Image (cartoon, rainbow, N blue to C red):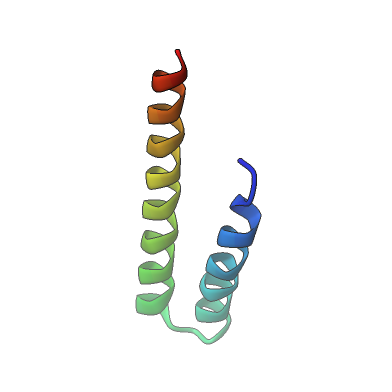
Amino acid sequence: MPGRARVSLPRHQRIIGAIVAGDPAEAEAAMRDHVASVVEALRALEARQERVG
């Protein structure tokens, strides 16, 4: 998806930072936020494809 790397990179950095810091609660929260954003992006893509036909 165009532009997705720009969104995903900071999220990945947050996940890695939490892991490196030894903060499992933050790592989990960051991962959950990231997965939720991916699901949202995929749903938006699916909706656009349905409109186009």
Left or right of residue 25, residue 1 in this image: right
Q: Position of residue 17 (x, y in %)?
A: 56, 80
Query: Between 34 and 45, which is closer to the camera in this rendering?
Result: 45
Left or right of residue 30, residue 2 in this image: right
Which residue lies most toward the top here?
A: 53
Left or right of residue 27, residue 14 in this image: right
Numbered label tally: 0
**Snapshot quadrant of residue 13:** bottom right
Q: Residue at x 44, y 59 (%)?
A: 34
Q: Residue at x 64, y 55 (%)?
A: 5
Left or right of residue 23, residue 4 in this image: right
Where 31 falls versus 3 (above or below)? below
Where 33 falls versus 37 (above or below)? below
Q: Residue at x 61, y 40 (%)?
A: 1
Q: Position of residue 35 (x, y in %)?
A: 42, 53
**Snapshot quadrant of residue 48:** top left
Query: Between 51 and 14, which is closer to the camera in this rendering?
Result: 51
| The C terminus - image quarter | top left
**Snapshot quadrant of residue 43:** top left
Where 32 falls versus 10 (above or below)? above
Which residue lies most toward the bottom here?
A: 21
Q: Residue at x 46, y 34 (%)?
A: 45
